[in-house]
Image (cartoon, helix red, strand yellow):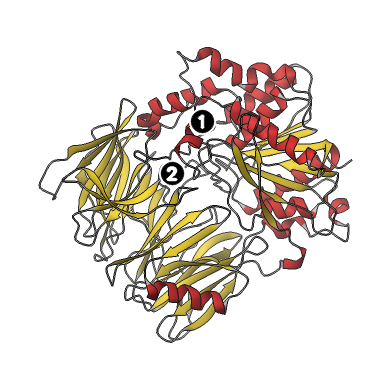
Amino acid sequence: MKKTYFLLITVFAVSLFSFAGCASVTTSTQITGQTALAEIVSETDQIPLRDFFKNPVAEAFSISPDGKKVAWVAPWKERMNIFVKELADGRITRITNSTVRNISGYFWAGNSRILYGQDTGGDENFHTFCAPVDGSGALDLTPFKNIRTNLLDDLENDDQHILITMNKRDPRYFDVYRLNVTNGDLKLVASNPGDITSWMTDNNGILRMAIAGRGGNNVILYRSNEQEIFRPIKTVRFSTTFSPLFFDFDNQKIYVTSNIDRDKAAIFLFNPETQRLGELIFEHPDVDVAQLMRSKKRKIITGAGYYSDKLHYVFFDDDREEVQTDIEKLLPGYEVAVTSVSKDETKMTIRTYSDRSLGAGYIYDLENKKLEKIADVSPWFDESRMAEMKPVSFTSRDGLTINGYLSLPVGKKPENLPVVLNPHGGPWARDHWGFNPEIQFLTNRGIAVLQVNFRGSTGYGRSFWEKSFKQWGLNMQNDLTDAVNWIIDQGIADPKRIAIYGASYGGYATLAGLTFTPDLYACGIDYVGPSNLFTLMETLPPYWESERDRFYQMIGDPVRDYKLLYKVSPVFHADKITAPLFVAQGANDPRVKKAESDQIVNALKKRGINVEYMVKDNEGHGFLNQENKFDFYEAMEIFLKKHLLQ
């Protein structure tokens, strides 16, 4: 898929159960965090909880194609909306009026319109909206019921149209449409035969590639031009990475990320006519390559990026390297990321960040080497009071090197501390270095936080990823248990004051931890996590149907692997749970249905065990509305104070 700088219209990823919070307006809460909050935050060494979770001043900065305007999202009536600034006269216009849902991402459609996606109450059925930059009001371009749209190509040389995928014809499959952004007119470009999982265009916006999932394989389909039919040119196992990035500047070959005949994914130039990987562009011996950078104006590849402890760049182009060096000199002490570039590549937006700061947004004038601040993201944070996120590693019981991050409370000796183990969602994702409001909130309360890139986490090569197949609740959970034992052995953790908290797959890991290692944790917090792998598989969103076979291979087949799924589903072993549990769930979650949380809560209640249970009727796979986040984290604070900090 063609990359855009900011994108809310969500693209499907294999990380099925990663946390992706959504929000809406009305709430239904079975517990709240208001009680005793004043007592908790009155302690002089604590930062008020809401400072960590309130809306930022501004974020998601992006320059217009002509370099004359800059956009960002900022609060209006407690919801994040899009603002546009004219650089010539400084005039700022709010171009959206959302009071129900945050707008967290968008992209430019020419210089006079911005497009964004929005769903209803967290159901992830994203519609495509168009907002003129004059503030005349947004238009829903896809006002159909029970559909989901994804951006395929912003058609940067056509201000009137974009390419989207949409499951209007059949909820299971995404067809390709050309969408007129001025009036919503749709034209079908390609119909999905039922197995296409992704589409790709060339640099001219012509649909040239597709990937089909067939019998556990990925079949790469290709055509030389729009008049030809798609033909299969390569077949790889689903567990083999072959990810097209973009076409070369002649639209003949394709830059791809692949681990064919290797463990770590590298970037190659692929020839669809010979069907072979050609020139090796970049590889790293220890991790998968994360990104490839290019200059469209100069038609050259400028660099690559890889993620080890943090994101690192390697530049192939002196001019691009000089830009990075100049910006980093102007902004010492921060990581610097280019988030958008004008079409003539004379202006760009910059975002700074670190593990102790959300940073700021800037405009950089390349010709004059001039840097102008747009806004600080969350200026109320005092960096000196924020915790460092330190990379750590340990060896699992079966000899794997497991990487992660440890954040320690500021000003406290790293001895005998209460600890929260925080497994990430996905599970085929990974934790990254940077500012995390949850982590900073917990460390400010005197709690150490350990994040673990357990087996199956992405970026560490094919073998490390495949070792997670059919290992939910088994070796994947063992890695988390080994992490707890490691931090105890280091003398950092008080063995009697260890909690486990995670969202999505991390919520499953929380339930599994309390179920299969009941003596290890003092308490647990499950945030939108599945409890029953059978019902989880039965209720996959319809548009994930083409991925079902690979989920069966990666998690387990409900028929062939019945014993396995029964063994590792916490709901069937709820009698083993003895530690206090707090469960939070969005009622409209399309990935992990509310029934997943209901089942584990009801199973414990039948045993006479009281479970704290928070449900938000206007949320989906996680909470995004500010007031709902406040409720959740206030309840979490009270829960941890009672069960971890006493």
> Taking 539 as reference, is 494 left or right?
right
Give x and y (percent) for residue 302.
36, 66
Where does label 2 land, which residue? 264
Q: Calculate the distance from the C-alpha at mark 1 to the C-alpha at mark 2.
A: 14 Å
> Taking 169 as reference, is 610 left or right?
right
Q: Residue at x 20, y 38 (%)?
A: 233
Q: Which mark is residue 467?
A: 1
Q: Secondary structure at mark 2?
A: loop
Along the polypeptide, which appears first: circle 1 or circle 2? Answer: 2
Give x and y (percent) for residue 449.
73, 47
Classify mark 2: residues with Cα within 10 Å, few (<14), some (14-19) or many (20+).
many
Q: Residue at x 50, y 48 (%)?
A: 286
Residue type at mark 2?
Lys
Give x and y (percent) for residue 618.
57, 43
Q: Residue at x 85, y 53 (%)?
A: 413
- Quarter placement of the C terminus: top right
Kindly check if marks 1 and 2 are in contact, taking CB atoms under 8 A apart as contact.
Answer: no
Residue type at mark 1?
Lys
Between disc 1 and disc 2, the foreground one is 2
